[in-house]
Amino acid sequence: MGVVIAVISGKGGVGKTTTTANIGLGIAQNNKKCVVVDFDIGQRNLDMILGLENRVVYDMVQVMEGESNLKQALIKSKANKNLRFLAASQTKDKSILESSKIEKLIRALKREFDFVILDAPAGIESGYEHTIEFADAAIVVVNPEVSSIRDADRAIGILDSKSAKVKNGGEVEKYLIINRIVSDMVQSGEMLRSEDILDILDISLLGKIPEDRGIVDASNQGKPVILDKDSLAGQAYKRVCDRLCGEKVEMKDVENNDKGIFKKLTGMFK
Amino acid sequence: MQGNQYSVKVYETEISDEQKFMTFFDSNYALFQNHLIVIKGELSQRVETYLKEKSLKYIHNVDLPKGRIKTSIRKSLEADLESEKIQNLAKQKEADERLEAQKAENFLSQQIAEEKLAELSGRLENNLKVLDGRIRSGRELNIEGDLLLLNRVNSGATINTSGNLIATMDVEGAIRCNGNFMMLTASPKANIVFNGVVVDNTLLEDKLNRVELEDNKIKITPVLKKEINWA
């Protein structure tokens, strides 16, 4: 049986979908069978970021309604054979979701895969509640800014009260990814430090992802940044995936700009 | 004149059945050997010889002074002195009694006060809610009674209490307290309304502050001063 991880944030635009795509691919690179599911019904993006938009024939809603079987709807990734993708419906909206059907779908995916990653929609409405309902764990993505932290806090609160695991007396494990860290801004105090964020949210830290200009292009190209070995964000996502797969990887301090002496010198002559 | 004063243990009894009396004394001899035995009513020859045999000290039909002995001693004093002193004594006694009565009354009222206090603290205990977990954004708490918060109140959370509030960690959410006092840490981001009055949270600058209402004005007193870092 696999583990179901929901990627949540509360606020939109903090990098949930990018994180989902990169984590899915990273886990597949670690030779684990992984499926990423886009739960953002009506506003799907994950297919584009994974570069699979032209392969979508059947979507999740059609599988749940019995119009197609699961095997047909699972799309194989171009980048890694261990990764599968299940698209959200673009024409329906989230009111179509039903708990019993979601549970059946997730059970089926759990049997097939080691990791089931659910990309939650932004906000805290029914679509979000359905995503977290059957999750075993959650990855909370935040940006180092107050509005993102507050929305994430709210999302965690709902997770702690509405998930099926909590209702059965269990606890959903929650991990934090701090995304889009700009080291200079943290140093100058414009951006929140990760210690402050952890103090507010009180969940365990899974990784810190530095801001990377390459991410926009990577998303447009449909090639997640983790495929780029030179990218700082890609390396950070790699460390996150290794941690998820049970390896002990040291937390790299991306908040301190560790510019080498050579870079410092070149910087002086710019 | 010289004399010695003693306190003596006395066992006073009336004999109805001689045999019973003797077996009782036989079995309890160790207890009574140093007692003065006072026999009331009839004292037969047989019992007397028995007591002498056991070398127990006994007296027959003596009305021993019990309780307040002083009055009986006064009787032997001269008449003038006696009456005066008795009067004084009576006064003293009266005063004593009054004092005693008052003491008893005080004791009673104290007892009542204590009982009331216990009742009150019992009520406080029942009504004091202690929350350990952090209050996350979007959560709204409505507390009847007092509240003790042991963790953070995050931005976007709301807490309403009818009683007093003590927060031991950072407060960034909204607080509506209608009690007699609040204890808060320095909370620059909090939104605090105390008994309908908005609290200027820039005034909460110390490590722990007490907020009270005095003549319809907010009064903030530092409880714990800021920690000074000498480094």
Image: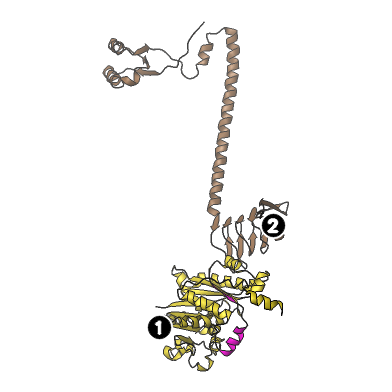
Chain colours: A yellow, B brown
How far apart, in angstroms, are the residues tagged by discs 2 and 1? 57 Å
Specify the segment rendered in magenta.
A204-222
Neighbour class for label 2 at 10 Å: few (<14), some, many (≥20)?
some
**Residues at badges 2 and 1 in contact (C-beta under 8 Å)?**
no
Q: Which residue is mark 2?
A: B205
Q: Nearer the viewer, residue B194 or A105?
A: A105
Chain to which mark 2 belongs: B
Q: Residue at x 45, y 17 (%)?
A: B7
Q: Position of residue A151 (x, y in %)?
A: 60, 73
Q: Is residue B93 left or right of residue B190?
A: left
Mark on residue B12?
none
The type of residue carrying mark 1 is Glu
Could one spot residue A4 in this view of the protein? Answer: yes
Q: Quadrant of the C terminus of chain A?
A: bottom right
Q: Position of residue B222 (x, y in %)?
A: 68, 52
Chain to which mark 1 belongs: A
Report which quarter residue A115 is drawn in: bottom left
Q: Nearer the viewer, residue B134 or B57?
A: B134
Q: Which residue is mark 1?
A: A112
- A121 versus B123 height, above or below: below
Q: Residue at x 67, y 75 (%)?
A: A264
Q: Position of residue B72 (x, y in %)?
A: 50, 13
Q: Nearer the viewer, residue A207 or A65?
A: A207
